Image (cartoon, rainbow, N blue to C red):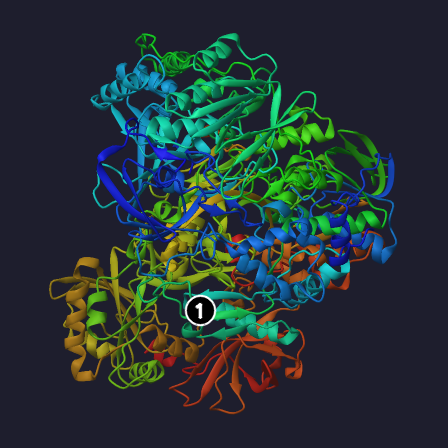
């Protein structure tokens, strides 16, 4: 792998940058691999990287129906955090944050990881109770999540207007110093480059159209628009489309796909330093390094794969935005988009074997960008060893057979 | 002075001068000017600096295709990131270039250019990793971003959001749009015609015939039709699901003081006649001020009477720019045309000859010179010979890209490569969506008008209306582009010379080449890696060039490279316009009980009680904080009598023979045998076996029942029951009516409650025998009808007095008067919380956190042993078998009786930093026990009564004794009294 | 912002309705007759179709009817509306 550094940049500048190599190869598609990973998004590529790195499994193809990182990795709002309630969830996401902290150097690719803190605005007593419970649970395991006063809120988010007249005046805030953002595309590219360097093949524009099975019912490969590819294990990392893909293997999962929209403003000079999240009114806003305000809210209230703007939800989010930040009324929206999020019945992730031997799924990612490093680490472990990683034992599909849901407080409505 | 205002011409009003300032210079313009046209008329060429390299940039387009003449408007209506080309010039307006210091002409940021060779596409991905990105990020953040957001309270636009509907909506009032609107309007159909300009006509020029006159007359005719609404200064910015089109209207004419209006329009038929945007031919340094799109040069002349230069080079690969050349020449500029084609159209050549304009054929402009403005260009011919032309203006035309953003937003229209025009045109589209004019490769104005008429006729046919014919207007345009020899860029002659393909992000052809070399070979990847097309113009001018360049560098055809998807918005839209009127009180309504005013007059601090209901939290007396007030109120209930406003409690009336069956399905307990005028507490599970809600059901009489839900769960319970009735058990005979806000509820509670009720002199018996716990009665208090329910949520004898909402205040005042001798105290939700914790009653959001079942919360005795089924039964049983490690409701007493524990505190083994074995769900200072008490959930809690457990609050360990979860009136004697 | 056709009230904007999700089969009359696997599948699993699927809507700010709509989850195109549980 060609090393990236200031010096290599300077050296290449002298040769008009003609010496840069491909970030990943474009090899011919073989007809057999040990493992086929379906979906070259963050999770699929991270999984491939960890398969190669920790388990020495390198005869791996990551196949992607579109372009690399073009699914939800391209469509999220790049937020990283670990403020959860359940012990397993806190540990899992805390490891992800820690992996992210090292990722640029580990992969030799600057993903512009920026730990700016996330601040939750608390605008109801119920939310105060929920988040305080979370913060105390997190304190057991490490990640910091501290209550701050309204005065501190206004000091740390000076862009907010006068709060006295707002519909739900903030009662307090919760600061999560680990809260971070990173350049989402770069996360996919960095893993792609690193996985490729370890021998993994990435095949874009290769769409799974079906599965092939051995006589014993186990999976034996995938059918694609480029022909049949045999594999001992097929691992889905098809955010948003898992139900759709796995239906071709005859399985039904406890998933619902919904649209989550986001939008950005035109770039402006720095005005918001932290990631502001307002769960009571369904709004979050942060400023990217480019200067754009990145804004989103809750998911749309209907099952959807549309990946667009559901106007009524969008209006709600914008109304909430200008309620707290009246000076943004004059800012302009530059771009908007939507991503297809799949929710498990209990709104927690699924990293699991399925009832078909050799077919595995990693799904149920809501805000899955934050879980890319740990999702890949644990999924790779499951694929390589057949056993769940100790961090992800709670995320198996088997939990649904006993209806032993992994519920975060405040997610009641997802069921 | 090279760019200057002409003595006549243009749609400006020379009798109305406007003074303004830009970057500290005092300048003047006229009414009708945009900021851009006024700057150009004042020969201000540098209007900003580029984002990355701070290269001087001028006006390139004349509308929203300009890739970045962003300014800040400091006054009179301060706003950031205003595109000079679409900003109406304000009198006494104060403008400043963005991101420059001290100003656009002399900008210190230009030092970045010295390092430009170290800043190729994606350079930041390759460096700034050591020691950490955090070290570099503040500098990058500070350097990025365009304008500054004006301070708070300076000026906020007044905006509204509004619905519109019509038979035919026409987007664009150029010849195609006017043709469509005329036909649709004359047919009598309701029409909305939207155009982003202040005047109709689109790109109609002033050459030959009377095109502008035709546009004006058509506009006036349409304006006089009662069935037509004209929306000038309005941009259709989004096509959304189910044919919803959003339009941003600026400074609406019909509403003084309104700055912005966002229209949400549903039209049966939509005709998009949005014209085309000219595309550039990038060459080295073609970003120098003074290099412009030919169409922009023509707009400056025609609409604003501004000649952008004295010595012009027109560089084109198609004939439309010849019109610009002639117009410039007529305006007195010296002009040379450089045509990339060896064989331009014969008529075009003769027109140039007649006007004495030089023509250089088969050649390219390959480099511009000058810094603050273009001073000369190099022209290279087919044999590589280079000559230099002195000039102060370069007008470029690389062909035209039909504006098919709206079609792209529908997702059903496909972009199709048009060989002759060398661009993408749109094909198909959803039902009710039509394209006219340039989008269908029609560039002749008269042809466009007729194509618009055709689109309208097609639309009217669907609507069952007859389309009147349109006489072909005389819109003579001698230079109509019908054939373009694609020229995506002119390669630089020397390595390192920069050819910008995207001004917004300073993306060069070298960057595109680098991205391809590195494997970012799909157009979407390339776009993201280089940021081409991601800037403020969202690739309006350059996106087809980039596709062409990728094709040229990879040997692929433009079709294979493919275009990217355009998403809303077509132009940047103010957030204020989208939010419209929705702020403060209008963001969403509060729900108030009829007693809110009374509570507030008594000094109550109001809380949201769920589902937007407002309820008193506590009524502080002077000097009291919430804790003191709550404690005093709770004490009054324990010792004498209190009264609270229970109106928000969810209430549902059920009627019909199958109500008992429904209740037996809904609740875990047996309800069928409940006799009239009796109530029963019930717990409802969702079908996955977890508690959804609890509440009391009363049987009012044989037929009628009243079901109570908790305040916050009312909507959920309503939906749950309706689904059962309409989906799962549609054959059952009963009706459900939500009556929450029909009935107000004043609840008397405390040892003196019954005596207060007696003092109210009801016409019914309130004795313990006549009105026992879980009993009910009805009657009059004076002239006020009431229903009284004996329910308790306080651990004291309670009487819920329900009355139709209109009587609430009168009843409440009588209660207060009657209760005065007993010291009646109004009670808020803080005191309610203390009382219910003491009594050990569960509460949603505390003990009921969405993860518990009935057994977990000690409600096992309520679970029916005889019913074969109720909702949640099967799942609850299944889960309890699979997962016996349940958290169970217990009481907790901190070993230190004065030690409050935060609600939500986790319980862990020995208070270690370890996995949770439970949590504190509620903790209060008990008035009944004079100490801190708590409720909690603990793994196997019921078996651990008497043990000591530990709450872990960050670094503090709080030992607590496990006790039964009831601290007051354990035998419920007081409740039943 | 969808436009939906209520079987009683006709074309109405989405704001009058609540989406009740995929039109799963009606609740089994005798849950005890199902195996554990069948029961958990009934509770949790969804077809989650990418394309045309049937879903329920509740006209809560209208006539209160719950009805089934066939809608494409990719384009959001609505095909048909049924007044009762018989899928369109």
Which image quadrant is residue B217 in? Answer: top left
Q: How many numbered discs sit on the rendered protein?
A: 1
Please report, as a chain letter, where disc 1 is located: B
Q: Is residue B778 left or right of residue B73?
A: left
Provide residue A244's location: percent of width, then percent of height.
Answer: 65, 37
Image height of C53 relative to B863, above or below? above
Farthest residue to the left: give it.
B783
Q: What residue is shown with label 1? A: B843
Image height of B511 relative to A160, above or below? above
Q: Secondary structure at mark 1?
A: loop
Provide residue B538's location: percent of width, then percent of height.
Answer: 52, 39
Q: Is residue B37 left or right of residue A271?
A: left
Residue B870 appearing in the image:
no
**Image quarter of the N terminus of chain C:** top left
Image height of B228 relative to B133, above or below? above
Provide residue B231's location: percent of width, then percent of height.
Answer: 30, 31
Provide residue B423's location: percent of width, then percent of height.
Answer: 57, 22
Mark 1 neighbour density, 10 Å: few (under 14) some (14–19) many (20 or more) = some
For the residue pair B826 and A240, the one nearer the viewer reads as A240
Q: Residue at x 44, y 11 (%)?
A: B354
Q: Is residue A302 left or right of residue B618?
A: right
For the residue pair C35 and B97, the one nearer the viewer reads as B97
Residue B467 appearing in the image:
yes
């Amino acid at each position: 792998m060609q090393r990236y550094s200031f010096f290599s940049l300077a050296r290449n500048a002298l040769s008009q940058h003609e010496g840069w190599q491909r970030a990943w190869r474009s090899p011919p598609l073989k007809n057999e691999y040990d493992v086929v990973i379906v979906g070259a998004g963050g999770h699929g590529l991270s999984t491939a990287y960890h398969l190669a790195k920790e388990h020495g499994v390198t005869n791996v193809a990551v196949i992607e129906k579109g372009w690399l990182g073009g699914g939800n990795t391209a469509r999220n709002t790049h937020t990283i955090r670990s403020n959860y309630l359940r012990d397993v969830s806190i540990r899992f996401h805390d490891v992800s944050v820690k992996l992210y902290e090292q990722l640029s150097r580990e992969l030799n690719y600057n993903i512009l990881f920026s730990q700016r803190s996330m601040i939750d605005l608390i605008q109801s007593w119920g939310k105060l109770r929920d988040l305080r419970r979370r913060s105390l649970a997190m304190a057991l395991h490490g990640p910091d999540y501290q209550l701050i006063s309204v005065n501190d809120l206004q000091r740390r988010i000076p862009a907010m207007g006068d709060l006295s007249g707002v519909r739900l005046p903030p009662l307090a805030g919760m600061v999560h110093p680990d809260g971070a953002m990173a350049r989402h595309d770069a996360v996919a590219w960095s893993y792609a480059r690193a996985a490729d360097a370890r021998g993994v093949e990435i095949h874009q524009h290769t769409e799974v159209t079906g599965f092939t099975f051995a006589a014993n019912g186990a999976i034996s490969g995938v059918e694609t628009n480029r022909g049949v590819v045999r594999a001992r294990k097929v691992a889905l990392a098809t955010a948003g489309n898992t139900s759709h893909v796995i239906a071709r293997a005859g399985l039904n999962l406890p998933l619902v796909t919904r649209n989550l929209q986001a939008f950005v403003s035109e770039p402006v000079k720095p005005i918001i330093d932290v990631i502001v999240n307002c769960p009571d009114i369904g709004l979050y806003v942060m400023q990217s390094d480019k200067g754009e305000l990145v804004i989103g809210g809750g998911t749309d209230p209907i099952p959807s794969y549309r990946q667009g703007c559901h106007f009524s939800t969008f209006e709600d989010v914008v109304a909430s935005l200008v309620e707290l930040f009246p000076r943004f009324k004059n800012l302009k929206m530059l771009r908007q988009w939507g991503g297809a999020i799949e929710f498990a019945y209990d709104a927690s992730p699924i990293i699991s074997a399925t009832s078909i031997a050799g077919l595995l799924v990693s799904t149920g990612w809501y805000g899955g960008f934050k879980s890319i490093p740990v999702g890949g680490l644990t999924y790779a472990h499951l694929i390589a060893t057949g056993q769940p990683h100790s961090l992800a034992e709670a995320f198996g599909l088997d939990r649904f057979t006993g209806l032993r849901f992994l519920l975060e407080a405040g997610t009641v409505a997802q069921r | 002075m090279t760019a200057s205002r002409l003595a006549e011409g243009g749609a400006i009003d020379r009798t109305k001068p406007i003074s303004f300032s830009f970057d500290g210079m005092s300048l003047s313009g006229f009414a009708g000017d945009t900021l851009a046209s006024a700057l150009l008329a004042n020969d201000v060429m540098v209007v900003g600096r580029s984002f990355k390299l701070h290269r001087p940039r001028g006006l390139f387009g004349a509308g929203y295709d300009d890739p970045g003449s962003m300014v800040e408007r400091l006054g009179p209506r301060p706003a950031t990131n205003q595109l000079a080309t679409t900003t109406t010039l304000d009198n006494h307006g104060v403008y400043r270039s963005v991101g420059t210091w001290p100003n656009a002409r002399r900008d210190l940021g230009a030092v970045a250019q010295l390092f430009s060779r170290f800043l190729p596409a994606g350079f930041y991905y390759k460096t700034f990793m050591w020691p950490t990105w955090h070290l570099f990020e503040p500098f990058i953040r500070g350097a990025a971003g365009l304008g500054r957001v004006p301070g708070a309270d300076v000026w906020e636009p007044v905006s509204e959001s509004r619905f519109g509907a019509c038979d035919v909506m026409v987007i664009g009032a150029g010849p195609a749009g006017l043709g469509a609107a005329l036909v649709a309007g004359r047919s009598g159909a309701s029409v909305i015609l939207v155009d982003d300009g202040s005047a109709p006509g689109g790109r109609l020029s002033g050459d030959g015939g009377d095109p502008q006159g035709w546009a004006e007359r058509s506009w006036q005719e349409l304006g006089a039709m009662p069935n037509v609404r004209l929306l000038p200064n309005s941009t259709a910015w989004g096509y959304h699901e189910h044919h919803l089109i959003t339009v941003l209207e600026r400074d609406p004419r019909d509403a003084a003081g309104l700055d912005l209006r966002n229209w949400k329009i549903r039209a049966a038929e939509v005709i998009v006649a949005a014209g085309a945007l000219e595309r550039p031919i990038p060459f080295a340094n073609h970003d120098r001020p003074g290099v412009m799109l030919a169409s922009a040069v023509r707009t400056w002349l025609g609409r604003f009477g501004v000649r952008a230069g004295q010595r012009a080079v027109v560089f084109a690969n198609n004939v439309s720019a010849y019109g610009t050349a002639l117009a410039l020449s007529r305006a007195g500029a010296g002009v040379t045309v450089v045509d990339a084609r060896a064989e331009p159209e014969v008529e075009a050549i003769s027109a140039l000859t007649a006007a004495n304009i030089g023509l250089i054929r088969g050649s390219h402009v390959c480099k511009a010179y000058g810094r603050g403005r273009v001073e000369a260009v190099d022209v290279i011919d087919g044999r590589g010979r280079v000559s230099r032309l002195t000039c102060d203006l370069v007008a470029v035309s690389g062909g035209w890209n039909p504006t098919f953003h709206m079609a792209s937003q529908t997702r059903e229209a496909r972009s199709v490569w048009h060989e002759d025009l060398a661009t993408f045109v749109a094909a198909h589209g959803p039902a009710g969506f039509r394209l006219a004019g340039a989008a269908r490769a029609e560039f002749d104005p008269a042809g466009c008008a007729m194509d618009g008429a055709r689109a309208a006729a097609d639309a009217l046919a669907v609507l069952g209306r007859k389309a009147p014919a349109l006489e072909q207007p005389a819109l003579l345009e001698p230079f109509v582009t019908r054939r373009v020899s694609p020229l995506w860029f002119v390669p630089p002659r020397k390595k390192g010379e920069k050819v910008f393909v995207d001004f917004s992000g300073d993306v060069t052809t070298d960057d595109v080449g680098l991205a391809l070399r590195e494997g970012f070979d799909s157009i979407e990847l390339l776009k993201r890696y280089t940021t081409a097309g991601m800037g403020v113009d969202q690739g309006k001018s350059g996106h087809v060039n980039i596709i062409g360049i990728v094709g040229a560098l990879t040997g692929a055809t433009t079709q294979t490279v493919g275009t990217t998807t355009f998403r809303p918005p077509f132009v940047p839209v103010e957030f204020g316009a989208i939010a419209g009127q929705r702020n403060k009180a209008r963001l969403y309504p509060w729900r108030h009980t009829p007693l809110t005013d009374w509570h507030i007059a008594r000094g109550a601090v109001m809380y949201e009680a769920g589902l937007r209901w407002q309820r008193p939290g506590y009524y502080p007396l002077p000097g009291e904080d919430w804790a003191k007030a709550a404690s005093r109120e709770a004490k009054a209930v324990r010792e004498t009598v209190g009264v609270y406003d229970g109106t928000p409690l969810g209430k549902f009336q059920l009627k019909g023979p199958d109500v008992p069956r429904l209740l037996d399905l809904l609740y875990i307990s047996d309800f069928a045998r409940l006799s009239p005028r009796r109530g029963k507490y019930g717990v409802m599970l969702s079908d996955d076996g977890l508690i959804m809600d609890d509440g009391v059901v009363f049987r009012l009489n044989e037929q009628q029942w009243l079901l109570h839900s908790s305040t916050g769960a009312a909507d959920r319970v309503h939906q749950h029951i309706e689904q059962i009735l309409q989906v799962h058990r549609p054959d059952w005979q009963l009706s459900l009516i939500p009556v929450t806000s029909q009935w107000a509820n004043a609840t008397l509670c405390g040892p003196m409650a019954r005596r207060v009720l007696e003092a109210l002199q009801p016409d019914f018996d309130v004795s313990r025998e006549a009105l026992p716990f879980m009993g009910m009665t009805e009657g009059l208090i004076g002239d006020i009808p009431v229903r009284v329910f004996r329910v308790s949520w306080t651990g004291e004898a309670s009487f819920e007095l329900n009355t139709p909402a209109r009587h609430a205040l009168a009843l409440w005042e009588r209660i207060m008067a009657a209760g005065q001798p007993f010291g009646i105290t109004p009670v808020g939700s803080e005191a309610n919380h203390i009382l219910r914790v003491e009594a050990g009653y569960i509460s949603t959001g505390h003990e009921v956190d969405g993860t518990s079942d009935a057994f977990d919360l000690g409600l096992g005795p309520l679970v029916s042993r005889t019913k074969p089924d109720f909702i949640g039964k099967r799942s609850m049983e299944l889960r309890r078998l699979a997962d016996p490690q349940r958290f169970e409701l217990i009481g907790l007493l901190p070993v230190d009786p004065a030690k409050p524990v935060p609600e939500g505190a986790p319980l862990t083994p020995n208070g270690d930093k370890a996995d949770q074995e439970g949590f504190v769900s509620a903790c209060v200072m008990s008035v009944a026990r004079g100490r801190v008490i708590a409720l909690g959930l603990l793994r196997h809690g019921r078996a651990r009564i008497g043990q000591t457990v530990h709450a872990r609050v960050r670094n503090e360990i709080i030992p607590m004794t496990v006790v039964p979860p009831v601290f007051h009136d354990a035998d419920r004697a007081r409740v039943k009294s | 912002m969808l436009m939906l056709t209520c079987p009683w009230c006709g074309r109405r904007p989405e704001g009058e309705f609540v989406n009740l999700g995929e039109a799963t089969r009606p609740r089994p009359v005798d849950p005890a007759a199902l195996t554990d696997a069948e029961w958990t599948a009934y509770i949790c699993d969804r077809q989650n179709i990418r394309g045309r699927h049937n879903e329920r809507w509740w006209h809560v700010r209208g006539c209160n009817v719950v009805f089934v709509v066939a809608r494409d989850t990719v384009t959001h195109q609505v095909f048909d509306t049924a007044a009762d549980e018989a899928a369109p």
